[in-house]
Amino acid sequence: MIRLEQSYKNLAFATFTLLLIIFYTSCGRYSLFHCKNNVRDDSMLIRADHAVSISAPNAYSLVRKGMGSVTDSLSYYRYCILLGNVYRLNAKPDSMIIYAKKALKYAGRQKKSPKINNLFAAAYEEYATYYYFFRMKANTCIYYHKKAYQYILNSNNINKAPDICANMADAFVQKNDIVQAAFWYRRALFLSDSLNLPHSANISLYLGLAQVYLNLKDYETSLHYYELTNKYYDKLLPNMQSYFLNNYGNFYYYTQNYDKAMCQFRRLMKLLLGGYKNESDINLCRINMADVFLNQGKLDSAQRYIDICSPYFKKIKLNDAIYYANTIYIALALKQGHPEKAREIIHSETVSVPNEANITEIRNKYLRDYYTKMGDYKSAYYSLIASNKQNDSLEHNKSYMRAAEIMMRFQQDTISLHKQINIDMRQKEVHNAYLILVLLIAFTVILVLSFILYINYSHKRLLQTQIDLLQLRLINVRNFISPHFIFNVLNREINNHPEDKSEQLIPLAKLIRSNLNLSRHGYINVKEEIDFVENYIAAEKYVLGDDFQLIMDLPDSEVLNKITIPSMFIQILVENSIKHGLLLKEGLRELKISIKHTNSETDIYVCDNGIGFSLKPSSKGTQTGLYIIRQTIFLINQRNKNKMTFEIHNIKSDTGVILGCESFLHIPSGMFFYD
């Protein structure tokens, strides 16, 4: 099995993926220099800028609509910059540069000012983007970045200076000048700290530095910046999440941890096939996965993935990607023991060799293996010498970059020292004013807290008074309930049974004792209420006769013990059914008590097959029990968000004949009862 030497493969793989991904992931930095101070009154410009930054489908229409609505020239040419960005995202470079030229010409005719300098910087950044993406001229790109950088430092939007530095670093990566790339990434971080920008603004800078150090095989420093980036993963836009996962997978790939590399690439593929779909990124992920499969020895998977993505690269005529795909085909042929197939690919290839030395180095490693198998040791020897020179150059770059970092940090320390001296002087000037301000604030805070405490105390007193009033009203209701039905029962017993019949009065004695116990509490559990109702029906059974039937559909006793209701409620409903419905009915009399309980509510039904119930007062009853129920519910609902409800209605047939009466009581869970 043929393997790549890690030093060369790392450089090639890293540079290739960076060049391909950067087109799709740099959109967050290569955008309009949006300044809130300039456009805070133009909400449409803000929406259009955001739509372009996230590549929204309606970005073009928003920009065009905004261009037609503005009245001042400066806002119009800001829209021109935005429109250029839209054309860049749609791979229309000629249209993109036209609008950048219009903005630049307008700025050139105006008197220099911070706002105009901001427009200059945005226009020059469009030029730099044009030469970066569509002409691959790194030196020209860097030239325009530097002009933009000079203008942004003298504009009203200096917070965008770190973004220009980061763009400059990307251009140096394209030029393969890793030292300068690291320098400008660090400059961007320094400016971000000096401007007190949020740490989340540095995410793309951390990612860029991680990639640079990865190219230099400084894995420890690279991992440090990847971990910093990972802290803010959830705050990244989908395109930057894609960029991060790809590069994080590369890190494990370079450290030869192919299982973890594949894990990151699978996460990336899940993201790409989910909400964030980008065909180019998907195929780039596939070619990376094919390379990992190749190193894992999973040749069938590598073959399948490279066969899927290779036609796409040929379709869009991306030379470097086609070259890299052919390289994987050559490696597959060699690993499968078919050097003649590798020779056919080499001799039939029509794409040009990429300018990037790192991309060609991975091909040269496979070619050395090919030369060895074909017996051409001379070619293999010269290829190895060239690779060693490249590796020596890489070590030289690392040393040079370390020296540049020391100088950069020295400059930062010097600037920080001067800044600290100025801060100390200002602190002395404002010290006295600060003390006065602190005392004033302390006095104000004490005054406000005192007022809040007074309001809180008054509110508590009011609540306590209302609770006391409610307790009195509930006590009155209870005192009204107990005598009401007990005396009715006693009078009936005395009138109907003048002779002493102890066996019939025993249930009545139990009923009276239960009532006395319940009268002490305004609220009881349903189990106690049901026991009391059973005693009540036992006392009334001789009146109801043998043709009376009681049906109960209840939950378990454990559940009934947990449900709290106002005392006597069910008894009142049962008494109402017996008194007004069942006593006057001939034949079979049925009374059904049904309770349905869930975590959120309890429903209680009392239903009879009597003659029905009239809601109009009559000499047969004053409806006192129903009044007590409604009045008690009214008092309870005053202090509860979820409300109890009570309904009573007659049951009728399709022809309007009364079949009985049904009472319904709904009790939400979490009710607060005052006892």
Image: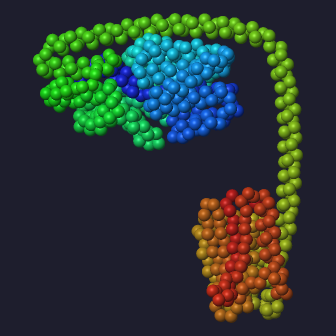
Judging depth in this view, the residue of 669 and 107 nearest the camera is 107
Judging depth in this view, the residue of 271 and 75 nearest the camera is 75
Residue 589 on image: x %, y %: 66, 88
The way the protein has been coloured in the rendering is: rainbow
Of the 4 image quadrants, the one containing the N terminus is top left
Question: Looking at the picture, does residue 132 appear above or below residue 590?
Answer: above
Of the 4 image quadrants, the one containing the C terminus is bottom right
Residue 650 on image: x %, y %: 70, 82
Q: Residue at x 69, y 68 (%)?
A: 666
Residue 414 placement, left or right of 254 = right
Question: Looking at the picture, does residue 512 appear above or below residue 67?
Answer: below
* Residue 533, quarter of picture: bottom right
Judging depth in this view, the residue of 583 and 179 nearest the camera is 179
* Residue 438, quarter of picture: top right
The residue most toward the left is 375
Residue 408 on image: x %, y %: 53, 8
* Residue 301, quarter of picture: top left
Q: Residue at x 75, y 60 (%)?
A: 673
Residue 254 placement, left or right of 127 = left
Q: How many marks?
A: 0
Q: Is residue 128 visible?
A: yes
Judging depth in this view, the residue of 11 and 467 nearest the camera is 11
Question: Looking at the picture, does residue 175 appear above or below residue 275?
Answer: above
Q: Is residue 503 visible?
A: no
Residue 113 on image: x %, y %: 68, 17
Q: Residue at x 71, y 8 (%)?
A: 422
Q: Residue at x 66, y 15 (%)?
A: 112
